[in-house]
Image (cartoon, helix red, strand yellow):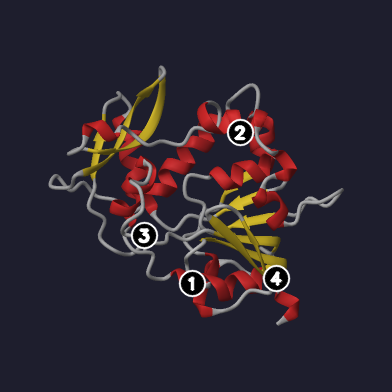
């Protein structure tokens, strides 16, 4: 995924061009003037921010990572807490707060829910554009007066592109979480803008099956795979058990069980 040519424009609307250029170069990104997607450094609510825009569809708006406000702030304050399906699937119960390795971090939303519940979460993101969006969201969250200390303690983005690069002897976690991209049903309702942009940016997650084996090597207690309710098992491997929600299921694999 990370090695393919990425069609994206790199646009800077702030005065810190050098910093933006350096960030993009470090991820191997180059400007493609013909691309309809753009990674843009701009100001959002008076603060420097990286956003993803679809240049040929202005109505779609920009996508960026915001842990401080918006939907995630509401979910942190008023969500289901330990009653959330992902909290139960990952193994949070009583005094047990597992460490988590999120191998498909994306915009970091599921990781944020777990971090808000006390889990120490390390994140791996395979796509360089998504990596930069997530890194930028974490930078702003770390500086926030209300949640900054918790975020610095509980959410850390690792400088690797794939969990296969991690050493199971030293980089293990209680739980490894996988939520790879999966095609939506052709006749399903129009998906939300983040998913529409991600599908154009990332395409088919063709190597998703290759995540399960390294995840099982890194997990001490369980691997949790989030899937749409209609999706096949990852790598065609049946889980030891599943937890189902309205539209998804969490397939759970126990490394010691074979």
Q: In this view, does 212 lie above or below 4?
A: below
Numbered tag placed on residue 75 in the rendering = 2
| Residue wearing tag 4 | 169
State left or right for residue 69 relative to residue 242. left
| Residue wearing tag 3 | 185
Q: Is residue 92 above or below residue 22?
A: below
The residues bearing labels 1 and 2 have C-alpha atoms spaced at a distance of 29 Å
Name the front one of labels 3 and 2.
Answer: 3
Res 26 visible: no
Local crowd at mark 4 within 10 Å, few (<14), some, or many (≥20)? few
Name the front one of labels 1 and 3.
Answer: 3
Q: Going from the N terminus, do you reach mark 4 or mark 2 first?
A: 2
State left or right for residue 159 relative to residue 56. right
| Residue wearing tag 1 | 232
The residues bearing labels 4 and 1 have C-alpha atoms spaced at a distance of 31 Å
The part of the image, by quadrant, that contains residue 21 is: top left
Q: Which residue is drawn at 48% across and 42% down?
A: 135
């Amino acid at each position: 995924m990370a090695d393919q040519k990425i069609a994206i424009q790199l646009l800077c609307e702030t005065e810190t061009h050098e910093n933006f250029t350096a960030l993009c170069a470090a991820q191997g990104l180059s400007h493609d003037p013909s691309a309809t997607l753009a990674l843009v450094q701009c100001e959002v609510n008076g603060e420097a921010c990286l956003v993803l825009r679809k240049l040929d569809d202005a109505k779609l708006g920009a996508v960026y990572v915001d842990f401080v406000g918006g939907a995630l702030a509401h979910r942190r304050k008023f969500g289901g807490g330990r009653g959330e399906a992902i909290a139960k699937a990952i193994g949070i119960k009583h005094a047990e707060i597992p460490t988590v390795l999120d191998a498909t971090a994306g915009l970091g939303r599921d990781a944020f829910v777990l971090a808000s519940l006390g889990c120490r979460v390390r994140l791996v993101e395979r796509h360089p554009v998504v990596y930069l969006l997530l890194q930028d969201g974490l930078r702003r969250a770390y500086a926030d007066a209300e949640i900054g200390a918790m975020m610095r303690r509980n959410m850390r983005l690792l400088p690797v592109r794939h969990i296969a690069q991690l050493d199971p002897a030293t980089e293990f976690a209680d739980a490894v979480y996988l939520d790879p991209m999966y095609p939506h049903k052709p006749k399903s309702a129009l998906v939300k803008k983040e998913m529409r942009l991600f599908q154009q940016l990332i395409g088919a997650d063709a190597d998703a099956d290759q995540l399960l084996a390294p995840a099982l090597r890194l997990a001490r207690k369980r691997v949790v795979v989030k899937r749409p309710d209609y999706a096949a098992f990852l790598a065609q491997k049946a889980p030891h058990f599943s937890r189902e929600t309205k539209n998804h299921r969490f397939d759970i694999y126990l490394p010691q069980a074979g």
